[in-house]
């Protein structure tokens, strides 16, 4: 029986792929998407008032100017389907309807994202899109949605590539370009097949609000997620990004040093940057961190190359990232609970990457030039902190 079932599923996959007449919308997410997602802070306690206030805050507080543009509602906005199978928003939480909310977000000059699931139900037990892919895609297109986060709960024996390809084709047939965010947690190695299916794919289980931890359902801390990106950087690039999940910056658990390290490494990965805090009421320090122009420029660099872990000395790691215009970024991260003394020869290191010449070295968190590659990088790196450097070529 198991052999027959496997054969049936294989034939079904071949049939779905052979019948697919759609494709991925191109020229979307040429840079890693930046925005805000409701889940990390609000979970299911979401409503249209919060979304409108978040859109207003993003427009007025400098985040929009810094490049954040997507407002994404996660799980729990939907409550059921009507007699024709059309997905319905919770009328108590969204009395004006999703279409009206999309218009409000668009009026702020922002883009709107919505959430669904490839299975029969979402992770919180709301209606999933399995069997309704084309109908849901038409609904989202009618609402003028710009971005779909597509989860992987209650999927049974579904094939991941086939399931996400089906929604890709549904979006294409609906006729409205939408960014497709594949959220199947890296279980089926989406980096190996996602390039022609979606615009970004989750590489790990959900992030949890901690620096160095994991829990029994698979949630991972910042360091654990970083460790899962040492071998998959080559799959990421313009229009198809590795996604290490949303940011936990500003949610009250990570220290300022840990938040710097968190954002620095997401930028080094050219990762999508989805704020997960309450941006209506965040501190000036959190806003300053999230809108650090020099760090965001490294994340948004047009080459879109993900960083390589160049060296690991116990709890000290050095990551290297090529940038456009023959520039480079380096990150020194301290994983330990104790300070680490650094005395590192960058000039020798860049030569190992077949890079020659003299470079100005700038600390992008201190916003100051700290020398050139003729001198070593020296100093004390505090526990759980980062030194993030941009190297700009000096022309004589």
Image: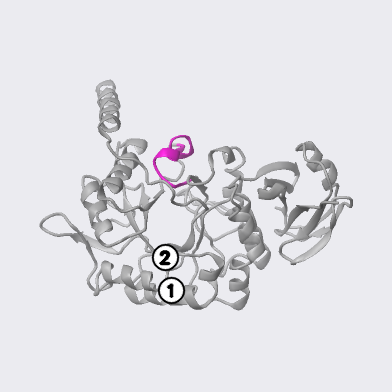
Magenta span: 189-202
Question: What residue is shown at x 55% (from left), y 74% (from top)?
Answer: 62
Q: Position of residue 122 (x, y in %)?
A: 31, 53
Q: Position of residue 334 (x, y in %)?
A: 73, 54
Position of residue 287 in the picture relative to residue 139 (left or right): right
Residue 20 in magenta stretch: no
Q: Is residue 119 in sight in this rendering?
A: no
Residue 197 in magenta stretch: yes
In the rendered structure, are the residues bearing label 2 and label 1 in contact, judged by CB atoms less than 8 Å apart?
yes
- Per the model, the C-alpha gap separating discs 2 and 1 is 9 Å
Extreme-left residue of the structure: 83
Question: What residue is shown at x 14% (from left), y 59% (from top)?
Answer: 82
Secondary element type, mark 2: loop
Position of residue 150 in the picture relative to residue 11 (left or right): right
Question: What residue is shown at x 28% (from left), y 21% (from top)?
Answer: 3
- The numbered dot on residue 54 is 1
């Amino acid at each position: 029986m198991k052999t027959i079932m496997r054969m049936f599923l294989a034939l079904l996959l071949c049939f779905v792929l052979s019948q697919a007449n759609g494709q991925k919308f191109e020229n979307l997410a040429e840079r890693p998407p930046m925005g805000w997602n409701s889940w990390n802070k609000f979970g299911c306690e979401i409503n249209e008032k919060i979304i409108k206030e978040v859109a207003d805050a993003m427009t007025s507080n400098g985040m929009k100017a810094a490049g954040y543009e997507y407002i994404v509602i996660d799980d729990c906005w939907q409550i059921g389907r009507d007699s024709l199978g059309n997905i319905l928003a919770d009328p108590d939480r969204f009395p004006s309807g999703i279409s009206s909310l999309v218009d409000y977000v668009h009026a702020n000059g922002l883009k709107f994202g919505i959430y669904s699931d490839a299975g029969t139900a979402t992770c919180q037990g709301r209606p999933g899109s399995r069997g309704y892919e084309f109908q849901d895609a038409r609904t989202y297109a009618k609402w003028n949605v710009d971005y779909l986060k597509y989860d992987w709960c209650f999927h049974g024996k579904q094939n991941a590539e086939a399931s996400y390809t089906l929604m890709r084709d549904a979006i294409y047939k609906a006729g409205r370009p939408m960014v497709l965010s594949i959220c199947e947690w890296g279980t089926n190695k989406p980096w190996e097949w996602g390039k022609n299916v979606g615009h970004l794919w989750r590489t790990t289980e959900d992030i949890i609000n901690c620096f160095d931890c994991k829990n029994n359902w698979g949630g991972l801390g910042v360091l654990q997620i970083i460790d899962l990106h040492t071998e998959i950087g080559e799959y990421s690039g313009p229009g198809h990004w590795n996604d290490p999940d949303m940011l936990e910056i500003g949610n009250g658990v990570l220290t300022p040093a840990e938040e710097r390290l968190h954002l620095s490494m997401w930028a080094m990965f050219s990762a999508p940057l989805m704020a997960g805090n309450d941006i209506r009421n965040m501190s000036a320090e959190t806003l300053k961190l999230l809108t650090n122009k020099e760090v965001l420029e490294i994340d948004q660099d047009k080459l879109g190359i993900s960083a390589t872990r160049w060296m690991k000395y116990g709890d000290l790691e050095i990551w290297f990232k090529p940038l456009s215009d023959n520039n480079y970024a380096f990150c020194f991260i301290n994983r330990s609970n104790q300070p680490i003394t650094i005395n590192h020869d960058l000039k020798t290191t860049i030569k190992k990457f077949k890079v020659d010449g003299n470079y100005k070295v700038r600390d992008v968190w201190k916003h100051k030039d700290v020398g050139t590659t003729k001198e070593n990088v020296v100093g004390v790196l505090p526990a759980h902190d980062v030194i993030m450097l941009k190297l700009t070529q000096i022309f004589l």
